[in-house]
Amino acid sequence: MSVATPEQEGRSNHWEVRTQEQDYAFLPTHEDRSEIKEKNRYGQLIDCVDLSGLPKERSMFINENPEVGTNPNRNKQHGFFFTADNCIGCHACEAACSEKNENPAHLAFRSVGYVEGGSYPDYKRMNISMACNHCDDPVCLKGCPTKAYTKHAEYGAVLQDPETCFGCGYCTWVCPYNAPQLDPVKGRVSKCNMCVDRLEVGLKPACVSACVGNALDFGVIENTPENREQCKTSIPGFPDPEITHPNIRFQQTKTLPDEMNRTDSMPVKYHKDKEGNYKPVIDQKAGKAKHWNLGKLNSRENPLVLFTLFAQAAFGTFLIPFLGALFGVEALTSFVHSDMFLPLTVISLVMTAFALLMSVTHLGKPMRFYRGFNNLRYSPMAREGFGLALLSAGCGITALFSLPMNTWVNEVSIELFSLNLVELSAGLPLSNLQLGAGIFTILAGSGGIYYMNKCYQIKARPFWHHIQTATSFLGNSLSLGAVVSGSIVVTTLILSKASSALIEQAIILFSSVFTFGLLLEAIGLIKHNKDLNKSDNEGGAAHYIQCTTFGKTYLLRNSLLGLNVLLASSLLLSTLLGFNDINTLLILWSALAVLNAITAIIGRALFYILVIPTTMPGAFFWKNKGFEQHARDIGLADNPATGVAPLAH
């Protein structure tokens, strides 16, 4: 009987021991391993079984093979060791990784970037080879809403399942090291898997085995490899290790200049402080001239611009009149008990549904949207989606309980179906049910907006990691919500011939909320500008781009916001002082509402397009956003070998 080959069985032949491997490609055996520490320098247990409580002899079922590796250190946290002094920038590690994982040209789980500095004849360049660092605190795992990530007891590997992923790209936002790779063609994320199939048969990862300069090594974390004298947690260009406690260690003994530059388009360089550590500072590559660049506000994040604005507006639309009625504001109490409360609730429902639809269209795999609730335990994105889904449901339930109390709906029901909803619902405490559903809706919406803010409080993106994100989101909820709900409430009061006192009360209330929302956003922007002007990290670099590349657009948005605050305050003050020409007030407020909508759209587009992550340095061509855009502009990106992903996602 013939034996099937690995290819015939549908599994990779990488599982079998490859006899052509050199001695340095094998992991240390039990006999020649050095003493292993109990904890790493961050205080984390190195024994992952003790940490996770999982059985020692568990099969990883790699390539559908149930065998268990015999490495005595199998359940210890492993990591990469990079000797920057030895790296010659040959990219053999990149090539070996991409060959093993069959990556297309535009993806690389491991990439080599570099920083350089000094001047002739003492010009120095330092290469950095980087992949996933299989961190102690993997922010990708906690951030992923689909639960596609797993921290394994075996080797401490952080593995990701592309088949579970729905392509939101959130893990690429939170990771400081460019490890997760979003493929815009396949619409999903994949990343370095530590070559666990090779580890199971005693081989080091493919990138390590391919390194010609002996710059890369691999083993149990904190064990300094042979012939090495350092085991550092950071080198120039490496983001703050405190963000995730990465399992990578470095050696870099050669003297470097006090200032090291990136050759990619990122406006960041690194300056040596008094302790000898290199910290990011702003590199004014774009000069100081201010530009419009309105066309560049158009990005793949456009659906998220609409998603956030519509979700915030929908929440504010329901919140303001319902909460006002709950606190006994006469004009709003009158409105909530009127026939027009049902249309307002339905409008909030439609706006929330549209927002959720926009968030789904942003996914690489939209039909997998239901997986977005898999990681409610950790992921703020999962909680955000869940809260907004409950907001939508709450609006629907509130509308349902409002149906029998709506005169128009009841008349139509009698005429078309001979059903008297009032009689059918007799005996039901509809007012109490509506009240309970409304309170539930407010709580759900508050949770959704809160976790929407938490989604952007990312240490790896300091431009977002600021109170301004919260003030912007809450401010837009109030200002946009006041516009939508105010127009419905005031129109209803006018058409129902309510007293001028009630109409004036409603106008003052919605004007106050609108103005407060604008002021809240303005205060956040002032603090954001003040803090980032003092910042030298990537947040300050993003603000530098905001003030130069988009400088005129930024000034336009700020000027419009200031004008909105001034006009809204003036209109509110004139109303309080007795100006009661309703028609004139409505025309002025309508114009102001349009102006505010334009301001909000520009501001939110800037919010997404400007952010600069705490990312690893790229090269002049590879992993360089500036080169990628240039390649698209001139058509070079049409050649797949260029390594620039098509904008298909």
Image: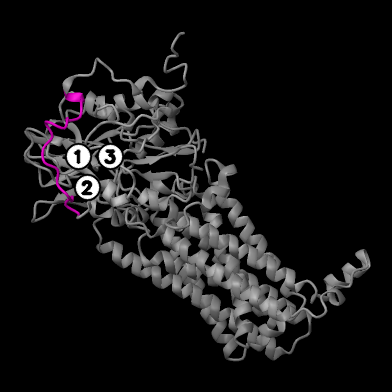
Give the residue at x 69% y 71%. 398
Q: Main secondary structure of the magenta part?
A: loop
**Mark 1: amino acid:** Val
Give the residue at x 63% y 57%. 353
Q: Which mark is residue 155?
A: 3
Residue 157 vs 529, above or below: the answer is above
Give the residue at x 37% y 37%. 191
Report the residue marked by disc 1. Answer: 220
Question: What whole-number distance in Å separates the C-alpha atoms at marks 3 and 2?
Answer: 10 Å
Asked whether disc 1 touches disc 2, contact meaning CB atoms under 8 Å apart, the reply is yes
Residue 205 vs 508, above or below: the answer is above
The front one of 403 and 44 is: 44
Asked whether disc 3 touches disc 1, contact meaning CB atoms under 8 Å apart, the reply is no
Mark sitting earlier along the chain (1/2): 2
The stretch drawn in magenta includes residue 66: no
Q: Dot 3 surroundings within 10 Å: few (below 14), some, or many (20 or more)?
A: many
Q: Which mark is residue 46?
A: 2
Q: Quadrant of residue 416?
A: bottom right
Q: Dot 2 surroundings within 10 Å: few (below 14), some, or many (20 or more)?
A: many
Q: Which residues are magenta?
A: 24-42
Left/right of residue 122 with respect to residue 602 in the rendered view: left
What percent of the width, then of the height, locates residue 207?
26, 28
**Mark 2: amino acid:** Ile
Question: What whole-number distance in Å separates the C-alpha atoms at marks 3 and 1?
Answer: 8 Å
Q: Secondary structure at mark 2?
A: loop
Coloration mode: one colour
